[in-house]
Amino acid sequence: MEKHNKKSLKARTWIRDRIIFLAMVIFVAGASLYISSAKMFAPDNIWLHPVKEFALLISMIGVVSLGYELFLRELTFSEYKEALQDIVNPHAVRLGIAGIYKNRSELGQAHNFQTLFKDVKQELFIGGTSLLSISTGSRDLLKEKVLAGKNVKLLVIDPESEIVDIITRQIGGKATFKNEIKTSILLLQKLQEEIAETDAPRKGKMMVHTYRFIPSHSFISIDVDEGHGVIIADIGPYLGRNNQRPSMMLLNKKKGLYAHYRELNKALWEDSTPLVAEAPAVSGPKTRTQVFASGEGTEFFDTESNGWRTASICELNSGWRGIKGSQWVWVRDSITLEEAKTGSQHKFRLQFGIPDGKANSVQRAELFVRSDDTCHITVNDVSLKQEYGGADYPDPFIIDFDQFLKEGLNTVTFEVINYAKPDARVPEDNPSGLIYRLHLEVPE
């Protein structure tokens, strides 16, 4: 269906372009005839004025056709589209809901950060718990926007607040959640330093605030006080687990939900405090924190071309759980029915560098991973004995492999195996995918 829609769009564009070209040809032909008629006929010739009037008529036809194609057709189409939406889904349109998505992966497939942030004209406001996905996957986008004169406001929970302790107990007493927040804060502070050290004539502001109250929702707000503003908000409270929540996109429509979330987000910011310049206290030597997450940077080995290619963000299965800041990947966005029946085996890899003299003093090399059905992991040619799956486990697998690291280029290979399911009726009966996040702390 998607391919059919793309072909129809291309066909309409092809026809529209040629209609515009034809209208311009008609206008130029009429104008040329009008100008040249004075040279073709004598001033007292009886044909001069009829030819001029005919040429003027031809030119007007071209102008009207061009104006209709460029302006009136689009305006009419937009009015019909809005009217049709009111008829088909009146409540969603009345509330300004432009889309509802069952999880972050589905939202990301429809509206990735690159596309969303591209439309920022004045201010980008993002709020959440750790913002790890933003600090790892979108730092370059944030820097680009600030240096281009846009303001960026980021709202993250205070890692030392009692709320973090409550959520930590709720998820079994593990320090993973607090570590995620601290890692994100360190990355955001590093980004602030980079922006401060970069000269730009129209530099905007990057502000990071922390809060100490129960998080109500996560959100992305773009030009919130403008008519073209957009708000993306999670539906439902944060539970401290890896289950992804539904999200909705809101447009600035009168008497809709947009105004409610705008005021709610504004209140969250007013009740927060600026992030202190110093990072949270960390014992030991000063380290440089890096986070590598599965997503567009992951590669897979293509047997047809006998080389490594960029992996695809895959469709999220209803039984899968996520890893914060990461996305499920595979060789394509979904498997075929044949692959679901016969099974498959693919290799993925992550590469990163460690400076000379630092490999033996790595403070942290912690890998979070899930896969479906299972995967074998190799670190710099050292194969780990255990198999790692756990797509639907409450907690991901956590692997410490700092003892396998070396100076220079390091490679982590994931061999994902999806077992055959001959009785599969649709591809969703036997999905396959990989998700991971690596925390790396190396002394500076």
Image (cartoon, helix red, strand yellow):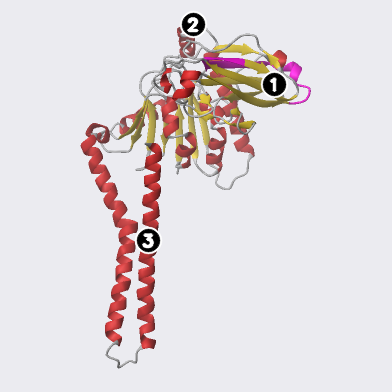
Most foreground residue, 343 or 111: 343
Residue 170 figure quarter = top left
Q: Which image quadrant for residue 264?
A: top left
**Circle 1 sits in a helix, a strand or a loop, which is it?**
strand
Mark toward the viewer: 3 or 1: 3
Mark 1 closeness class: few <14, some 14–19, many ≥20 residues within 10 Å: many
Disc 3 target residue:
20
The answer to whether mark 1 and mark 2 are in CB contact below 8 A is no
Question: Which residue occupies 38% across, 66% down?
Answer: 24
Q: Label 2 amino acid?
A: Gly
Secondary structure beneath dot 2 equals loop
Q: Which residues are magenta?
A: 355-376
Q: Is residue 369 magenta?
A: yes
Quadrant housing the N terminus: top left
Q: Earlier in the sequence, mark 2 or mark 3?
A: 3
Q: Position of residue 103 (x, y in %)?
A: 40, 24
Give the residue at x 48% y 13%.
164
371 in the magenta segment? yes
Q: Which residue is mark 1?
A: 442
Q: Dot 3: few (<14), some (14–19), or many (≥20) neighbours within 10 Å?
A: some
The answer, for residue 266, to whether it is visible in the render is yes
Q: Which residue is mark 2?
A: 172
Q: Residue at x 36, y 84 (%)?
A: 37
- Of labels 1 and 2, earlier in sequence is 2
Q: CA distance from mark 2 to mark 3?
A: 65 Å
Rounded to the nearest angstrom, the CA distance separating label 1 from label 2 is: 28 Å
Residue 159 screen position, x and y as percent: 52, 17
Residues 236 and 105: in front is: 105
